[in-house]
Amino acid sequence: MASTTATLPSITSLEAADDQTLKSILDTLFEPSAELHDLAVPEIRGPASFASYASLIERVGSLLSELARHSTQPDSGSKLYGILGSHPRLGEKKVESAQSRAEQAHLNASSAGSAEREEEAAKLRILNQEYEARFPGLRYVVFVNGRSRPVVMQNMRERIDRGDVRAEEMEAVQAMVDIAFDRAKKLQPTS
């Protein structure tokens, strides 16, 4: 399988970029999501220009936070859950996004033996199912940031046990923003 390294275009080029290019950038920074496209492309096209990818991510993050604050309203909730649901489940073998695949590689690799890795993978599948049963329509989103599978699974357990859907929505939004910042840092061309 060939490896392709994505890069982001210069932030100054976004003003003249077509919608497909803007959607591709959003897909790269966040995850492919029609709901995110509908929410963010008009903002990127708006009167404010962005001096950096960080400022673009901050703006998208504020739009997502606004959706989370109003998630009990049907339109806001369905948009938010569509966006958060675009992230792949942790530990899944088939991950569409190249960025998510690379980010989860560390999580799925372990110095443990094969049987122990399989046991951890089974526990993670069960936690994903339990999480999605506790928070219908949501998917667990976390900025892995090199943490081990047991550490991430402990975080998932704590969030399931907390059982606070509003806090979970805000935490998932913050994780998406943190992931986007990390991706932007890694994918910006060096000048």
Image (spheres, helix red, strand yellow):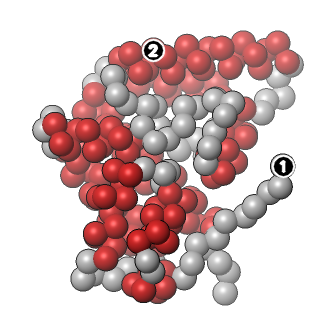
For residue 152, which quarter of the picture? top right
Q: Is residue 190 above or below residue 162?
A: below
Instruction: Locate residue 187, reporting x and y percent.
Output: 63, 67
Q: Is residue 67 above or below residue 62?
A: above
For residue 131, which quarter of the picture? top left
Q: Disc 1 and disc 2: Cα gap in Å?
A: 33 Å
Can the viewer see residue 158 in this picture? Answer: yes
Q: Amino acid at mark 2?
A: Glu
> Are the two marked residues, 1 and 2, in contact with CB atoms closer than 8 angstroms?
no
Q: Which residue is mark 2?
A: 130
Dividing the image into 4 quarters, which one contains the C terminus?
bottom right
Dot label at residue 37: none
Dot label at residue 1: 1
Question: Is 73 placed left or right of 10 in the picture?
Answer: left
Q: In what element is the residue under mark 1?
A: loop
Q: Give the class, few, some or many, for how many residues have Cα within 10 Å of label 2's Cα (few <14, many ≥20).
A: some
Image point 60% across, 20% down: which residue? 124
Question: Is 126 placed left or right of 57 in the picture?
Answer: right
Image point 55% across, 66% down: which residue? 184
Q: Amino acid at mark 1?
A: Met
Can the viewer see residue 181 in this picture? Answer: no
Q: Give the class, few, some or many, for how many residues have Cα within 10 Å of label 1's Cα (few <14, many ≥20).
A: few
Image point 65% across, 78% down: which residue? 189
Question: Is 98 placed left or right of 17 in the picture?
Answer: right
Q: Is residue 189 above or below residue 64?
A: below
Instruction: Locate residue 100, reporting x and y percent.
Output: 61, 46
Instruction: Locate residue 21, reporting x and y percent.
Output: 49, 72
* Earlier-in-chain disc, 1 versus 2: 1
Image point 83% across, 55% down: which residue? 2
